[in-house]
Amino acid sequence: MAAADKLRWGILGTGRILTKLMGGFRLARNATVGAIASRDPDRAATRAGEFGIPKAHGGYQALLDDPDIDIVLNALHNGLHCEWTVRALQAGKHVLCEKPLACSSDEAEQMFAAAHKHQRWLMEGFMYRFHPQIPQVSRRIAAGEIGTLTHIRACYLGQGRERKNMRYRRDTGGGALMDLGCYGVNLSRLMAGREPKQVLAHARFDAETGVDMTLAGMLEFDDGLTAHIGCSFESEGVFGAEIVGTEAKILIPHPWLPPAWPAEFEIVRRGAAEKVRVEDAHAPHNSLCSFGLEIEHLGECACNEKPPAFPPDADAERDSRAQARVIDALLASARGGGAIALT
């Protein structure tokens, strides 16, 4: 695709994730960043200068009103995802909204209702799904290479940010589950190939802010399959996923953002470990390829009028709606609701 044919993206937000996002845009073959917006005009101008972005808007609505922008990436904090995604859709822009899509399943429903009303695509930014290792692992499991699934474990633990960060506020969708645990929930649902019937969670809440600092959750599926997810703002870094079957297990050391290319995972069978190197001729050979591939995908959907899909073959809208419902249930359980059934 020639440079002149590239979709022109606008980015809402100037936070730390911008460095990774811009790395993804440099890899995406059908995209260019035309503008960035912040409520602080000086910050918008500074960040635009850092990354060579042509326009800096001192307000989110100004970017949405920009006729030179075709598609929007909502990289604002969780509490602003619903409002500004809906506004972007109303302005006629397709939207890639950073995970988690919304602060509740009710918000997610509002956002997709707006997408349908204004006939624009909306996709949740679970970039890890686009890294070639995830579809490869998923297809191996679906093909029965590790037998019948019995257990899934997914962890994303680390040290938190400064205490003034929006991740520590309940009214902005903060907490370890929303920020980190959502990955484990998503991967567990993907590998299971179905939705959980019941969830149970326990958490340690911050006395001052009320957000979950550490949360452990269990997802119960039919046929006895269980998944355990762990997330924390107050731990040494723990990353990884383990998918256990009756014949073998798969270990993914870096499921969320592999630090190098090519990535690797292991298949352990009867005590013998086989390392699998993940290489894909269609993926940019770069640790940030997942960002570039998700950007490319939504761009293709916008140009070809096809609905967004998460790899390997999932309806992205249906997946995000179900994801929001599971997170709602886990938070309700952690706040004293006991085991919660999902219908």
Image (cartoon, helix red, strand yellow):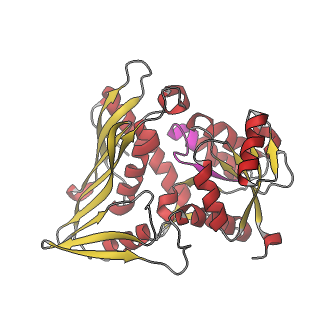
**Residue 89 in sight here:** no
Q: Decide: is 208 above or below 36.
A: above
Q: Residue at x 67, y 57 (%)?
A: 121
Q: Residue at x 49, y 30 (%)?
A: 162
Nearer the observer, 177 or 192: 177
Q: Quadrant of the N terminus?
A: bottom right
Quarter location, residue 270: bottom left
On screen, residue 318 versus residue 45, left or right, reads: left
Q: Nearer the viewer, residue 173 or 292?
A: 292
Q: Residue at x 49, y 67 (%)?
A: 311
Residue 316 versus residue 185 in the image, above or below: below
Looking at the rendering, the stretch of residues picked out in magenta corresponds to 94-108
Image vertical order of residue 62 relative to residue 255, above or below: above
Q: Which residue is outermost to the top? A: 208
Q: Is residue 10 left or right of residue 340?
A: right
Q: Is residue 273 left or right of residue 195?
A: left
Residue shown at 76%/64% (left/top)? 7
Residue 210 belongs to the span the image colors magenta: no
The spot of residue 333 in percent (x, y) is 33, 33
- The foreground one among 183 and 40 is 40
Residue 299 falls left or right of residue 267? right
147 to 211, vertically: above or below? below
What is the x, y in percent for residue 340? Answer: 31, 38
Query: Can you name the residue that lies furthest to the right here?
Result: 67
* Any part of residue 209 in sight: yes
Outermost residue to the left? 270
The picture places residue 191, in percent across and down from the top left corner, at 35, 62
- Is-magenta flag for residue 102? yes
Query: Residue 136's spot in the image, x, y percent?
Result: 40, 73
